[in-house]
Amino acid sequence: MTAALLAGLVAAVAIARPLAASQGIARQTVAPPDLAALKAAYERDRSDARAAMDYVTGALRTGQPELARPVLYGMLSRPSALPSSVAAEAWFQMGHVHLNAQEYEEAVACWETVVRDHRGSDRASGAAINAASVLLQVMGDADRAWARLTASLRDRTISGPHVELAHFLLFQIYVERRDYANARGLLASLPASGPRYDLIQDVIPVVLWKTGDEAAARLKIEALFEGAAGDASALNNLAGTLSAHGVALDVAIASAARALLLAGARHDIWDTYAEALFRSGQIDKAIEAEEKAIAMATAQKDQAEYRARLARFKAARKGPG
């Protein structure tokens, strides 16, 4: 899972509020909050913790975390005046404020405070652990995320609807670690459809392949390839996943090549194509494709990443010594 995807997921987790029982399990559309009305209610009585939290949540949902920060600071400066459930929510949403400001360690610390000090709250039953675990992966610290998730699942700190997301996050960590056996063990715990399944559909055949079910994996890979026929991004993602894990490299090359037919000016696709060629042993063609990616890229970060990859290809062509 990319950092951008993880960041989007943690943002979605962080701003979510538990629904009342009368509101049902899920809601297809959510009307934007009337922030002016929420602010007026808060300013009428700033000691009303519920009104304060409603205003905070409205500010976050309308993309204005800077409005939420001072309110939360004020609430958390007098925690003894807050009911435990409200304090848990305040710490949780403060984590989201820090997330928006890219203050990642501070965000993780807020969510850990929820888990440590407010174990009876809905947030502490898994939402805070999951949010911290996603963010730790964004920060490149999957080991800390793994430790939190496995310990919390073992002692059942994570419960209810949060368990499915925890399993999903663990699955991602195992795949990144190339621990395919444990990743496959979690497949039965993951939904067979829905948005989370869509995020990992390219990875599932990799796990099957690496755990000895190559025939089933090949069928899934071919179905994904045909299903993405006119979608350059989907083809690029499939090619990148297969290349990264060294699986079905013929399909990886074909998928990247088809993506180039659809969007040949995209440097990221040329980069993916180069990696697929390199993994299959076609080093000279890989170097040529990577040079095209470098020529098209304008961002310094992309340039640096592609040049490092090109250097790796050229070193491999020279051989050891």
Image (cartoon, grey):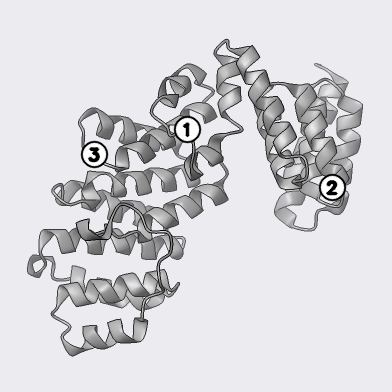
Q: Residue at x 49, y 52 (%)?
A: 7
Residue type at mark 3?
A: Ser
> x and y percent of residue 68 in the render?
33, 74
> x and y percent of residue 71 in the render?
27, 76
Q: Which residue is mark 2?
A: 262
> x and y percent of residue 206 in the render?
60, 23
Mark 3 and mark 2: Cα distance apart in space = 45 Å
Say which element carries label 1: loop
Q: Earlier in the sequence, mark 3 or mark 2?
A: 3
Q: Is residue 71 left or right of residue 79?
A: right
> x and y percent of residue 78 in the render?
13, 70
Vertical comparison of 43 with 321: above or below = below
Nearest the camera: 174 or 297?
174
Badge 1 density bin: few <14, some 14–19, many ≥20, Cα 10 Å: few
Q: Residue at x 70, y 52 (%)?
A: 301
Vertical comparison of 99 with 238: above or below = below
**Quarter in which the C terminus is drawn:** top right
Circles 3 and 2 in contact, beta carbons < 8 Å: no
Mark 3 and mark 1: Cα distance apart in space = 20 Å
Q: Which residue is mark 1?
A: 192
Nearest the camera: 161 or 302?
161
Residue type at mark 2?
A: Leu
Q: Which residue is mark 3?
A: 159
Residue type at mark 1?
A: Ala
Q: Earlier in the sequence, mark 3 or mark 1?
A: 3
Given this view, does label 3 or label 1 mark the residue nearer the observer?
1
Q: Is residue 310 visible?
A: no
Q: Is residue 38 left or right of residue 173?
A: left
Say which element carries label 2: helix
Q: Residue at x 56, y 18 (%)?
A: 208
Q: Earlier in the sequence, mark 1 or mark 2?
A: 1
